[in-house]
Amino acid sequence: MNLLVKTLLTSSILLTSAASFAQPLHSGGNYVSRVYHKTVSIDAVSSKQQAYALGAEKLSEFEDMNGRDLNSALVPARAYGSARNSTHLKEGGYVTVQEILNNQGQIEYVAKVHVNVHYQERDSNN
């Protein structure tokens, strides 16, 4: 009898905890935490060093923005009722440079700024 009670108790605890792990991270007030990877391209320039410098400048500009400005610049337009003031960048933003050949046959370099934006979006299921 003791074994049956322990087995039922253990299985009910496991089933209850499994449902909580399957849920997205809720931050209260019907908001859900989201992380969105955004890549921003910078205008093409003639040198790789200049492209890296422009990309680093843009990354620094994003890092200095407040939550409201980040939200309007980087959060997808389809985000439903996002909490604008809580928007921030996650660690690990970086810059890459892509070499391209323009229509005049000249090689140009395009900086791409990669950032992960953390924001809260209103849960539309309620």
Image (spheres, helix red, strand yellow):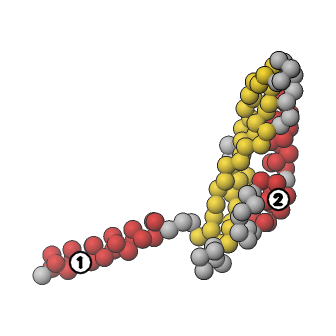
Q: Nearer the viewer, mark 1 or mark 2?
A: 2
Work out whether residue 126 or residue 35 is closer to the camera in this orientation and state it. Answer: 126
* Above or below, comparing residue 10 to residue 67 in the picture: below
Work out whether residue 75 or residue 60 is closer to the camera in this orientation and state it. Answer: 75
How far across and how far down the image is residue 77, in percent?
76, 60
* Residue 45: quarter of image: top right
How far across and how far down the image is residue 76, in percent?
73, 57
In the rendered structure, which amino acid carries the disc numbered 2?
A: Ser
Element type where label 2 sits in the image: helix
* Above or below, comparing residue 26 to residue 113 in the picture: below
Mark 1 or mark 2: name the one nearer the start of the chain: 1
- Disc assigned to residue 8: 1
Q: Residue at x 15, y 75 (%)?
A: 3
* Above or below, comparing residue 104 to residue 34 in the picture: above
Is residue 124 visible to us here? Answer: yes
How far across and how far down the image is residue 51, in percent?
83, 28
- Residue position for label 2: 72
Q: Residue at x 79, y 66 (%)?
A: 85
Quadrant into which the C terminus falls: bottom right
- From this viewpoint, which residue is outermost toward the front? 103
Element type where label 1 sits in the image: helix
Q: Residue at x 77, y 25 (%)?
A: 100
Disc 1 to disc 2: CB gap under 8 Å: no
Q: Residue at x 84, y 18 (%)?
A: 106
* Label 1 to label 2: alpha-carbon separation: 51 Å
Work out whether residue 30 or residue 39 is closer to the camera in this orientation and state it. Answer: 39
How far across and how far down the image is residue 93, in percent?
71, 42
Label 2: how many residues lie within 10 Å, few (<14), some (14-19) or many (20+)?
Answer: few
Quadrant into which the N terminus falls: bottom left
